[in-house]
Amino acid sequence: MINLAMAIPFVLRFYENDGVSQYLRSYISLAPWITITFIAIFYVFKLYNRIWAYASTGELFAVIQAVTLGSLAAIAIFFFAHAPLPRSVVVMHWAFAIQLMGGSRLLWRYAVEHLKTNGHKPSRRALIIGAGDGGAMVARELKGNKSSFLPAGFIDDDPMKRNVTVLGLPVLGTREQIPEVVARLKINLVVIAMPSVEAAVIREIVDICRGTKAELRILPGMYQIIDGQVSVNHLRPVQLEDLLRREPVRVDLKEIAGYLGGKTVLITGAGGSIGSELCRQVAAVGPRKLVLLGHGENSIHSIWLELEEKFPSVALAIEIADIRDKPRVDNVFQTHRPDVVFHAAAHKHVPLMELHPAEAVKTNIFGTRNLAQAAVRFGASGFLLISTDKAVNPSSVMGATKRMAELIIAQENMAGITIFTAVRFGNVLGSSGSVVPLFKKQIARGGPVTVTHPEMKRYFMTIPEAVQLVIQAGAMARGGEVFVLDMGEPVKIVDMARDMIKLSGLEPDKDIQIKFTGVRPGEKLFEELLTAEEGSSATEHKRIFTARPSLVDVEALESELVNLSRKGLQCTAEDIFNALGAIIPRFRSYRKVQAG
């Protein structure tokens, strides 16, 4: 091909006179040197180390670079041999060499793809929403594998992409034209391939597609695009998380690895929704030992088996224990000497804790105190409490006891070298006790879907993103802070119920009724993330803020803890709120306004 690329320009340039034979004779004498030079340059550019069955623009650019350098070398060889080439021949040789080298390799890719499909003709057609990176990767995957779907084209709102093709597939219109395109081209599958788009756009596209008979799938998450890991198996039905999603969480892996890597980490409530995800993400960092502490043996056993399979190199220790048992807690700390403690164990169910306030006190207050004091005695370097937005101006027993836990952490931060901090956030999607699993069950049995109040709002996060931010906050802790996670905008529970009904292919208030049951004891219509006196300050992470710690009378805190301890099983909700009011005077006035 190297020699053919040089011979063709001679014939084209001098075919009407005798110059062709003169130049060809000169070239033939120099051909071995030119050929060896080109092959050496191709070797340097690693053209012989590439899998051309997957050739793309990167490989073509490498061919252009290598041929350009080879052509310059050929000009030099002719010059030193006193046989300079005409400029037209030089230009044509460069162009023909690129066509022959690049074309032969792209032809090989085409042949391999044709053999791969082996004449396979999909019986159904797919329409891809989004003609960007994600859409192109989905189209390539559908075309290159024996999928049952053949991509018919793209939908994209970008005016610059109208009437253009991507990978040979046309951009057929904007999102408003989806129903018409689906009907005209007999589309069977619509794929949303916009992994970084806002939730409002996803919601609108879902509403439009619901008017068609096509199946709807989505490419989830930006990480597949970053890693190039897109396959047909990644496409899944649209879920509630897609309608609520925000900008992906980014964490500083080096900073996290610095305070967790090679350390002994204890996680309480390790079998719960938050605790188990903490175990997964901490294990991925490579701790020296990961201690899983929990009260429920079945949930601990489940996460233990999962971690053993996924992270065989991480040393695991299992402790079935009740954090309310002070001697047992001390024994765990003495045995393992944890460097970092993530405290996720708690009673969290608001209505149940209104019925059993003494249990909330024993677990959320005194269980936290047992762990915090053990962390100081046994020299833990860091202790992070998982708190809740319900601890802000609490109206429930659960919220009040978690607020007391925050105050205990602030007090213990002054007691020794252990850095204590708390992280406060709202509801997490899919956690045990959240509305999402309840709504799914109610929809599955035909309704009604029960919502407490039409104006009830809550902050929501996915479990993985909440845990990522918790771990990041732990890396930023200096002691005594209450970190507050950016939860985005609050979501109406009734809107969430309607979205879930629609995602199930049903019509709210037609196929599935929504029933309002009334606000339950201890619930507020709207949760807050900060008290009025706390305010907030930005941190280096734009999704994490710090609240100014409240000034607490340490003697008053100790006195009220003693009073609550004495009451034991006779402890009432009023006792808890009175104790909190005695510690934080401002809370008394807030409580009166709330009661009024």
Image: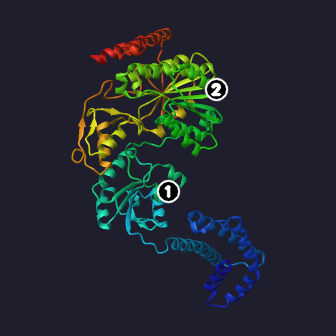
Q: Nearer the viewer, residue 157 or 493?
A: 493
Q: Find numbered disc 2 in the image and state the secondary structure of the residue it sits on.
A: helix
**As shown in the figure, which amino acid type bears the numbered disc 1?**
Val
Total numbered badges shown on the rendered structure = 2
Q: Position of residue 570 (x, y in %)?
A: 38, 14
Q: Residue at x 30, y 40 (%)?
A: 495
Q: Is residue 496 above or below residue 207?
A: above
Q: Residue at x 26, y 34 (%)?
A: 454
Q: Is residue 482 above or below residue 578?
A: below
In the picture of the structure, the residue carrying the numbered disc 1 is 230
Q: Find numbered disc 1 in the image and state the secondary structure of the residue it sits on.
A: loop
Q: Position of residue 358 (x, y in %)?
A: 41, 18
In the rendered image, the residue lying farthest to the left is: 510
Q: Residue at x 25, y 32 (%)?
A: 517
Image mark for residue 344: none
484 displayed left or right of 227: left
262 displayed left or right of 396: right
2 or 1: tag closer to the N-terminus: 1
In the picture of the structure, the residue carrying the numbered disc 2 is 335
Q: Is residue 103 above or below residue 163?
A: below
* Labels 2 and 1 touching (C-beta < 8 A): no
**As shown in the figure, which amino acid type bears the numbered disc 2?**
Thr
Q: Quadrant of the C terminus?
A: top left
Q: Nearer the viewer, residue 489 or 22?
A: 489
Q: Position of residue 119 (x, y in %)?
A: 47, 75
Whether residue 534 can be seen here = no
Whether residue 430 can be seen here = yes
